[in-house]
Image: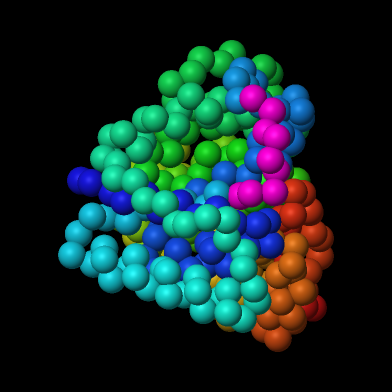
Amino acid sequence: MQWIEVNIQTTHEGVEAVADILTSVGATGVAIEDPQLINDLRNSGTWELCDIPEQENTEVVTVSAYYADDEKLQARLARIEEELQAVEERIGKFRFGNTRFRTVSEKDWANEWKQYFHVTHVGKSLVIKPSWEEYGAQPGEHVIKIDPGMAFGTGTHHTTNMCMARLEKVLPENATVFDVGTGSGILAIAAGLLGAKAVKAVDIDGVAVRVAKENIANNNLTDIIDAREGDLLHGTEGQADLIIANIIADIIIMLLQDIPGKLKDDGIFLASGIICDRREDVEAAAKKVGMQVDHVDEKGGWVVMQMSKVK
């Protein structure tokens, strides 16, 4: 299948607005190329074998999304431009240059970026290892073998990285976990390796579910993790000890309405993919449904919020 890659260069403040628009038009995930994040990773000591040069212009962030080259494509592209212009009329210009388009095959997209994805250490014990690289695990380490393919989730972005580190700290013993918007399955796999007894991983995109299942099998976790297609929590049954959602603020706010009913009384909700500017919006939405924010991690302009039911 052929895909159209849509690239939009924006300010740091405009990232979430652009991501929201691309998602609302049918993208199942976005790729965010943040030069400041790249520099932070290069200097952190947690990303091995990094061969990306120091980034000079850290003010321009590139947000990319992929759409199938089918009969719906032209209408989607037109709507993207209309919504971008509508937002700029309200808040002012936040784009640099014109929207760029590129035709790629699924095979090309899934392989050409591999030169930038290397072994990454997260928290005290988690290690993300691309399937095409070798790594000798140290005692006590949990190695996640991952190949994102056409799905979102390498673990190197602040949102996923912080969510994994927080998961390592708070995951209850023998927990039941729901992973909403699983993408590549990386957070579900992390939960499984950290000791969850059952994980239900859900994504609205069939391609993501296929990729997640492959990654789950490669990590020998098919007995623990069930990946399925579904819209938010609609693919889950029962209640969870911990729910993870690494999406975007507007979807988190929508999802919060269902969280109290799907979370056990002493359960934990980890919400990620939220830019700092939207933190108060998410906190307000949580309060309305009887949830409280117990802890917030912040890095690179993004936050991960740990929540629980108000007692």
State which region is magenta: 53-61
Q: What residue occupies the far bottom of the structure in this picture?
A: 288
Residue at image point 67% right, 46% down: 158
Asked whether 12 falls inside the magenta stretch, the response is: no
On screen, residue 189 above or below 310? above
Residue at image point 70% right, 35% down: 56
Image spot of residue 48 (x, y percent): 64, 21
Q: Give the quadrant of residue 69.
A: bottom left
Is any atom of residue 260 visible in this view?
no
Q: On the rendered structure, is 43 left or right of 92?
A: right
On screen, residue 235 above or below 105? below
Residue nearest the viewer, comparing 104 with 141: 104
Image spot of residue 127 (x, y percent): 62, 29
Q: How is the image coloured?
A: rainbow
Q: Main secondary structure of the magenta part?
A: loop
Q: On the rendered structure, is 121 left or right of 230?
A: right
Image spot of residue 235 (x, y percent): 40, 66
Residue at image point 53% right, 39% down: 154
Q: How many marks?
A: 0
Is any atom of residue 115 visible in this view?
yes
Residue nearest the viewer, comparing 305 with 63: 63
Q: On the rendered structure, is 73 left or right of 183?
A: left
Image spot of residue 147 (x, y percent): 43, 33
Residue nearest the viewer, comparing 22 with 158: 22
Location of the C terminus by quadrant is bottom right
Residue nearest the viewer, comparing 31 with 217: 31
Residue at image point 53% right, 28% down: 116
